[in-house]
Amino acid sequence: MDAIAQVFRCRGVDQGFVVLESAAHLCKINAAELSQLTSRLSVAARRWARLADDLSESGTESLVKLMLLRLGVPFRQQVAIPGVGRVDFLLGEHLVVEVDSKQHHSNPYADRKRDAALSILGKRVLRFMYSQVVYELPEVESALLGAIARLDHRRA
């Protein structure tokens, strides 16, 4: 917990949130410890730390989650879609957001097959790579907001 608190202090909310969610996903911190940790953080950091959970399977997913939370965009995470499997994020009923990294998405063919299966089900897929999320987050944000403005999350 000391290390996570230090990350929030020294590296900021974004990196602190990523580390906190990673610890939660790996079952290295429980609810009581999370409560104790948040009491040691600044008011700004505490606000976001309270929204952390164990669903993000990568730091990149945590960054996208934090972006969606900041934008006030409702979403569900790690949603099971019959015939396809779990998707990283589902906005509304029809906009799927996948966050790729080499570790979890080393097979572009399989990813495209999933995208096609999702399309058959009436879903729109936005797929972002690690480098886009880490180095080009404003572009990722614009793409998501554009899709929402077009009501892609509501289309059947």
Image (cartoon, helix red, strand yellow):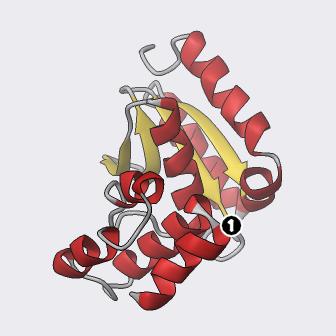
Seen as rendered, the residue at the extreme top is 150
Residue 134 image offset from top left, x and y in percent: 75, 57
Residue 148 image offset from top left, x and y in percent: 55, 19
As rendered, which of 32 and 91 lies closer to the eye? 32
- As displayed, is residue 19 above or below residue 123? below
- As displayed, is residue 95 above or below residue 87? above
- Residue 93 visible, this orientation: yes
Give the residue type at disc 1.
Ser
Residue 59 image offset from top left, x and y in percent: 58, 68
Q: Secondary structure at mark 1?
A: loop
- Residue 114 visible, this orientation: no
Residue drawn at x 44%, y 89% as measured from the top left: 2
Residue identified by numbered label 1: 101
Quadrant location of the N terminus? Answer: bottom left
Residue drawn at x 57%, y 72% as measured from the top left: 9
- As displayed, is residue 13 above or below residue 54? above
Residue drawn at x 27%, y 74% as measured from the top left: 34
Q: Is residue 58 left or right of residue 51?
A: right
As rendered, which of 77 and 74 lies closer to the eye? 74
Quadrant location of the C terminus? Answer: top left
Residue 31, located in which quarter of the rendered image?
A: bottom left
Count of numbered badges drawn on the protein: 1
Residue drawn at x 58%, y 35% as measured from the top left: 125
